[in-house]
Image (cartoon, rainbow, N blue to C red):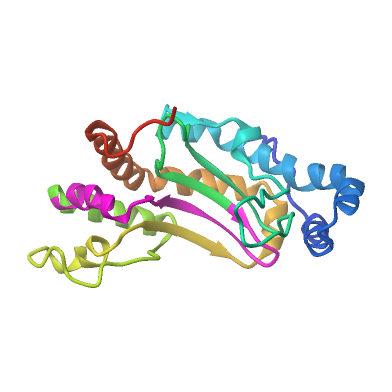
Amino acid sequence: MEYNYKGITGESIELLCLNRFNDSKPFYEEHKEELKQGITIPMRQMVLDLSDVLYDIDDKMFLNPVRAVSRIHRDTRGNRSKIKYRENMWTFFRRYKKDYPQAPFYYFEFYPNRFGYGLVFWLWRPTHFQYVHQVILENPKRFMNAVKACADAGFEFSCTDFYKTDRYPDAPKELKPFLAAKNMAFSYDCYDMERLKSTALIDEMRLAFDIARPMYEIFIEAHERMMKDGVIKPED
């Protein structure tokens, strides 16, 4: 299959890091086109190359290549760090955030020394994650099959915040780590930066995202219940 993606080279990543190190508008303006061609455009190409699989997973996905990719220039308003430029970049594959705030999403990101991709569900109010717990408890077998699918996709489970007390003491043991979670990520990380140059990366992401589809469906079901109950509301 022929892809749009032309790869991200080590030289482009090095320039992105130099731009971050200089933190200078004159430096950025001097190298703006190089950064666009070497970093921003390949990531937009990635969105195009994944869009058919992602639309098949969820036909409400908002996959505008320009809007989906992070900007090199940071918005420093209200941020403790006043550094203007990034050395890491990402793209989120998700529903339109104003119509579907806090929706679960697939992602791709890279840093100077590593890259990764996966599936994430974060909420502004961790207590709302009980909706995910409810879906898990209603059909534990479905959920554990989805966990296995994520493992088959090469993803590992992680969570940045857990409940300290057991909120579901009668739940099966294998569900405990997930029922204690206030957010969830199933992700893959790699330190072989040479792989960013090849379209083989697109092939593996297409396959991984599709294999992890059962977990995305669980997340989106919980999110839709939150929307229905008015726990999460569309932005004006």
Q: Give the range drawn in magenta.
A: 109-137
Judged left or right of residue 50, residue 33 is right
Please name the residue shown 89% across and 49% down the image. 31
Q: Tell me: residue 48, above or below residue 23.
A: above
The correct choice, above or below, for 77 with respect to 230 in the image is below
Q: In this view, does 228 lie to the left or right of 151?
A: left
User: Hey, which quadrant is residue 46 in on the image?
Assistant: top right
Q: Which residue is drawn at 80% across and 65% down?
A: 21
Q: Residue 29, percent across and down?
A: 88, 46
Image quarter where the C terminus lies is top left
Q: Position of residue 118 (x, y in %)?
A: 48, 53
Which image quarter holds the N terminus?
top right
Residue 150 versus residue 122: which sits nearer the camera? 122
* Residue occupying image coordinates x 83% and y 62%: 18
Instruction: Choose between 4 and 200: the one closer to the eye.
Output: 4
Magenta residue check for 128: yes
The spot of residue 28 in percent (x, y) is 85, 50
Residue at the spot 68% in from the left edge and 67% down from the top edge: 113
Q: Is residue 228 above or below residue 72?
A: above
In the rendering, at what x and y percent does residue 105 appear? Answer: 45, 44
